[in-house]
Structures are given as C-alpha cells and as structure tokens.
Image: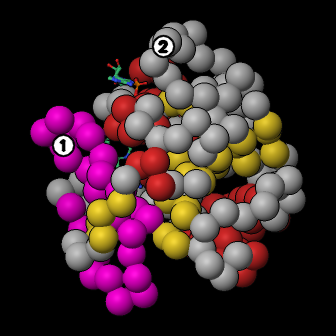
C-alpha cells in the first residue's frame, strides 16, 4: 500500500484498540524491548505520546533504560510546524512541559542538545516494513532530524502491529535499526 493509505489504515487500527487491549500490547512490547541485544547508552531521545492518536507511551521503556543505565539522559523533540523541523532538548526531573497545538507535551525549559549528541532514539511511527522503513505522519520531521544525527545512532521503532508493505519508500527515508512489536524484535 502507499504511505498515504497506510496512514489512514494504521490510525484507524490504533484508535480501534480498547484500553484493555492496548495495556496488554504495551506490556508485551516492554517484554520484547527488554530482550534487545544492546548495551544501554547515555543519551536517549524519547517522545511524549499524542493521546488523541493512541500512540504508544514509551514511559516504561524510559524507566527500563534508566534502570539498566543510571547515567541515562532523556531528550525530547520540540517541533517547529512552520518548517517541519525538530529540535532536541534534554530534560531534568523538574523540567516543565507544555502541550502544543497538536496535543504534544513538549519541554519548555530544557537544555538544547546537538542531534549528534544522541546515542539512541525511540522513533514514533504508524507502521513499518520488513526492511526497516517507517511511515510517520508524513511531514518528514524525523527523516530530516535523523539525517543530522551520528551514523551509529541506534534507531528503535515501536509498533502495536506487525509490518506492512510500503509501496513508495523514498530515497531520503531513514532506516530503523530495530522495531519492537508485541510479538518480536525486528532487527534491520
Ligand atoms: N509523540 C510524537 N511526537 C512527535 C511526533 C510524533 O509523531 N509523535 N512527530 C513526528 O513527526 C513530530 C510532530 N509531528 C506531527 C505531525 C502531525 C501531527 C498530527 O496531528 N497530524 C494529524 C493531522 C493534524 C492536522 O493536519 O491538522 C493526523 O495525522 O491525524 C502531529 C505531530 C514531533 N513530535
Ligand atoms: N532528509 C530530508 N531532507 C529534506 N526533506 C526530507 C528529508 N527526508 C524526508 N524529507 C521530505 O519530508 C516529506 C515527508 O516524508 P515522509 O513521507 O517520509 O514522512 P514520514 O516519515 O511519514 O513522517 P515523519 O518523519 O514526520 O514522521 C517528503 O516530502 C520528503 O521529501
């Protein structure tokens, strides 16, 4: 399917999950994440989920990263919807967040961080394919941002559903290193 058709389908599939089903899938995803064959680096970019789009909430994964590596530093994206770019901000436990016009909690007094300082990134997505390419909301925020990160950054997608076939992968699309589903880890 095209990315446009996949966006519509996977938004519907996510929104159709009951709270109980979503809770169960989130537990299974955490269990899979805990099997990842990596050592946990210091600087981890995560995201605050968009509730109205039923995104996966990575909070338990963040806690697991801190448990495995107490030196973990958490970073969140702040989106500029004028030019569809992201900026990374490191947060502390007392950092304030404010909800932006798209319903995303963003840090308002974090410390700006260069994309090259990020070691690992949890990348939001709607779906992905067996080759490690993802479909997001179609504004290219993450593709552009990942292009500025270091070569050996670990990119991890998380999906409630198994992979799809994407007919229109673009040459600028960035490939994930792993995608976690409730059933297994895909390594690319
Ligand atoms: N949690 C989270 N944060 C993120 C992203 C993300 O995918 N998830 N982004 C990843 O890029 C950036 C923001 N990109 C976004 C792109 C579209 C929409 C959105 O609400 N799209 C609606 C249509 C809204 C409209 O056009 O009025 C939709 O897709 O239904 C939200 C965020 C940065 N922060
Ligand atoms: N490295 C890049 N530099 C400039 N433009 C880019 C880059 N990568 C992607 N784009 C542009 O961004 C637009 C959206 O890309 P795409 O459809 O892959 O978004 P997406 O991955 O679904 O969304 P997102 O990254 O926002 O979650 C496309 O028009 C694409 O040309």
Residue, far bottom: 94
Asked whether mark 1 lies closer than 8 Å to ligand 1, one says yes
Asked if residue 72 can be seen in this view, the reply is yes
Front in this rendered view, residue 39 or 53: 39
Q: Quick one: quadrant of the N terminus?
A: top right
- Name the element at disc 1: loop
Image point (53%, 41%), residue name: 150
- Name the element at disc 2: loop
- Point out the tag, 2 or 1, that comes first from the N-terminus: 1
Residue to which mark 1 is pinned = 81
Image point (30%, 63%), residue name: 112
Image point (69%, 38%), residue name: 177
Front in this rendered view, residue 177 or 138: 177
Callout 2 touching callout 1 (CB < 8 Å): no
Q: Which residues are magenta?
A: 75-100
Task: Give the Cα distance between marks 2 and 1.
Answer: 22 Å
Residue to which mark 2 is pinned = 170
Residue 52 figure quarter: bottom left
Q: Estimate the x, y position of residue 61 in percent, counting from the top left.
A: 65, 68
Q: Quick one: quadrant of the C terminus?
A: top right
Looking at the image, residue 4 sits to the left or right of residue 24; the answer is left
Asked if residue 98 can be seen in this view, the reply is no
* Placement of 126 over or under 98, stated as above or below: above
Query: How dense is the environment of label 2, judged by Cα within 10 Å: few (below 14), some, or many (20 and up)?
Result: few
Image point (30%, 52%), residue name: 87
Asked whether residue 83 is drawn in magenta, I would say yes
Assign ligand 2 to one image quadrant: top left
Q: Estimate the x, y position of residue 49 in percent, counting from the top left.
A: 44, 61
Asked whether mark 2 lies closer than 8 Å to ligand 2, one says yes
* Placement of 67 over or under 122, stated as above or below: below
């Amino acid at each position: 399917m095209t990315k446009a058709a996949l966006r519509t389908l996977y938004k519907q599939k996510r929104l159709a999950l009951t709270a109980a089903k979503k809770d169960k899938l989130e537990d299974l995803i955490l269990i899979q994440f805990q099997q990842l064959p990596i050592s946990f680096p210091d600087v981890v970019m995560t995201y605050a989920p968009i509730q109205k789009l039923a995104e996966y909430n990575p909070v338990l994964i963040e806690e697991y990263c801190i448990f495995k590596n107490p030196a973990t530093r958490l970073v969140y994206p702040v989106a500029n919807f004028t030019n569809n770019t992201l900026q990374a901000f490191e947060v502390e436990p007392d950092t304030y967040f404010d909800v932006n016009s798209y319903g995303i909690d963003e840090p308002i007094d974090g410390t700006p961080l260069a994309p090259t300082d990020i070691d690992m990134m949890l990348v939001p997505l709607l779906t992905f394919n067996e080759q490690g390419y993802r479909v997001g909301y179609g504004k290219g925020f993450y593709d552009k941002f990942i292009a500025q990160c270091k070569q050996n950054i670990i990119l991890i997608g998380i999906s409630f559903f198994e992979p799809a076939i994407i007919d229109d992968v673009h040459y600028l699309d960035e490939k994930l290193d792993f995608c976690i589903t409730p059933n297994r880890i895909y390594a690319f």
